[in-house]
Amino acid sequence: MAMKIAERLRHEATLVKKAQAWIVGLQQKGRDYAAHREWEEILNTRSAAEIANILVMENEEGQRLRSSHPFKGVITEAERLAIIEDAYAS
C-alpha cells in the first residue's frame, strides 16, 4: 500500500496538505503521539518526492514510519482491496 501511496504522492503533491490536516485533527482530539509529531516534522520539511521515498524505504526506519503514516484515506477502498488481493495471489 505504501508503494501505491508513494506513487500518488509523486503525482499529487496536494496529498501532503491532506496528511498535515489529518495530523492536526488527531492533535485536536488529544491524540498527539510521538509518531504523529515525527510525521508532522517530515511533512513540514520535505518535498512530496522525498516523502514518497521515505514511504518505500526498505529498512527498519521505513517500516517504522509506514506503521504510523498519515496518509489514511489516500487510496480508495477498492484500491486497498486490490493490493491485498494481489499480495495473496503472489
Image: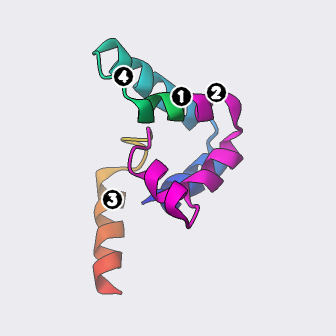
Q: Secondary structure at mark 3?
A: helix
Q: Which residue is mark 3?
A: 80
Q: Secondary structure at mark 4?
A: loop
Determine the residue positioned at 28% across, 80% down.
88
From the top left corner, tell me how far across and down residue 90 is, in percent.
36, 87
From the top left corner, tell me how far across and down residue 57 is, in percent.
58, 61
50 in magenta? yes
Q: Which residue is mark 1?
A: 40
Determine the residue positioned at 36% across, 22% down.
32
Mark 1 neighbour class, 10 Å CA radius: few under 14, some 14 to 19, many 20 or more? some
SS majority, magenta: helix
Q: Amino acid at mark 3?
A: Arg
Task: Give the number of the mark in front: 1 or 3.
Answer: 1
Is residue 14 among the parts visible in the rendering? Answer: no
Q: Which mark is residue 44?
A: 2
Mark 2 neighbour class, 10 Å CA radius: few under 14, some 14 to 19, many 20 or more? few
Marks 3 and 4: CB-CB under 8 Å?
no
Marks 2 and 3: CB-CB under 8 Å?
no
Mark 1 to mark 4 CA distance (whole Å): 11 Å
56 in magenta? yes
Mark 2 to mark 3 CA distance (whole Å): 27 Å
Q: Amino acid at mark 2?
A: Asn
Marks 1 and 2: CB-CB under 8 Å?
yes
